[in-house]
Image (cartoon, rainbow, N blue to C red):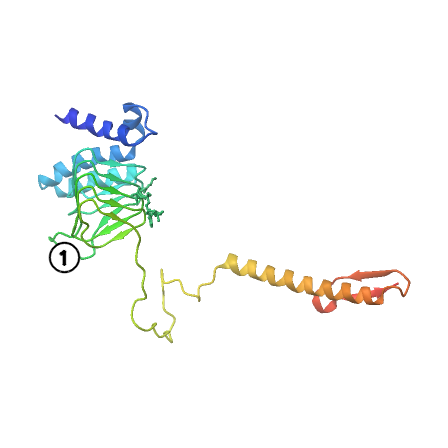
Amino acid sequence: MLLKNLRDEIDATLARDPAARSRLEVVLCYPGFQALLFHRLGHWLWQRRWLLAGRFVSHIGRVMTGIEIHPGARIGKRVFMDHAMGIVIGETAEVGDDCTLYQGVTLGGTKLTRGAKRHPTIGKGVIIGSHAQVLGPFRVGDGARIGPNALVQAEVPDGATMVGMRARPLGAHPAQPSPEPVFQPYGLGEDIPDPVARALNGLLDEVTSLRTRVAELEKGERLRSGGGGRRELQLGNGADDQERVA
Ligand SMILES: CC(C)(COP(=O)(O)OP(=O)(O)OC[C@H]1O[C@@H](n2cnc3c(N)ncnc32)[C@H](O)[C@@H]1OP(=O)(O)O)[C@@H](O)C(=O)NCCC(=O)NCCS
């Protein structure tokens, strides 16, 4: 039975990834398949209340594959995680049979209620595009498809295709600036300039002012041309620019 399940999972990878060429390649080179092996063991321990051991096996799987699956999560058969780096599956998430998840997918929660269901239930045969975020304790219907980078925060009907994400201002008015300096770890405002962009802008300003100065000098030279003698332009630092007539 165990061997049959393993073979089915390998075959699911072969069927869904044209880049996969042999069962051995799937076993050796597919982190999605390897992560499922760690998860099966971690989940087995978790169900028997060996919680720390389950978490530890899950953690080893994360270190080895870059995929984080909580041992409490329920993962169905023939689930295929392609590329798979960065996938996160939370404790109370459920993933149905024959689902496909691409890299960066999060099946996460938005509430901290301990013991409650916090993560989504994914139906059968669902495809979740790369870096999509499915957050909350709702159901994604059988056969649904979720586009890359989509943010899904509510129930998805069977067979639906979901794309896009919302962004909106938080609060009616912008926050008042604080008189005291405030540490803003990820609140990247204008006060935190990009040093590379600042250097490039300085160089562009300099080039523009030099071009203007050269144009002025060329114009003066043209007006005075015909007066004879050899003329030489000497460019200095802005104000020092001067014209010498030999
Ligand atoms: C979202 C998805 C499931 C839709 O597949 P589909 O039904 O075959 O749809 P199509 O690709 O034919 O696109 C249909 C329409 O939806 C639009 N569309 C597709 N994906 C979209 C997205 N993420 N955001 C906005 N519009 C999208 C297309 O532009 C097209 O619009 P049009 O009819 O006006 O030209 C699929 O495009 C997808 O992105 N799958 C996940 C792929 C992925 O993550 N790959 C990672 C590989 S490493």
Where residue 65 appears, as percent x and y from the top left, is: 29, 37
Please tell me whether residue 174 is drawn above or below residue 50 in the rendered image: below
Front-lying residue, 15 or 76? 15
How packed is label 1: few (under 14 Cα within 10 Å), some, or many (20 or more)?
few
Q: Is residue 245 left or right of residue 198?
A: right
At x 35% / y 75%, what residue is drawn?
176
Where residue 141 appears, as percent x and y from the top left, is: 17, 46
Q: Is residue 168 left or right of residue 201?
A: left
Where residue 184 appears, as percent x and y from the top left, is: 36, 64
Residue highlighted by disc 1: 113
Question: Which of the 4 image quarters holds residue 54?
Answer: top left
Front-lying residue, 46 or 203? 203
Q: For the residue marked with disc 1, what is the amino acid?
A: Thr
Q: Secondary structure at mark 1?
A: loop
Question: Which of the 4 image quarters holds residue 111?
Answer: bottom left
At x 30% / y 55%, what residue is drawn?
165
Name of the residue lying farthest toward the right: 228
Task: Identify the image quadrant of the C terminus.
Answer: bottom right
Task: Identify the image quadrant of the N terminus.
Answer: top left
Name of the residue lying farthest toward the left: 48
Where residue 190 appears, as percent x and y from the top left, is: 44, 66
At x 32% / y 37%, what residue is drawn?
83
Please tell me whether residue 225 is drawn above or below residue 94 in the rendered image: below
Ligand 1 under 8 Å from disc 1 Cβ: no
Quadrant field for ligand 1: top left
How many numbered marks have been drawn onto this rendered protein structure? Answer: 1
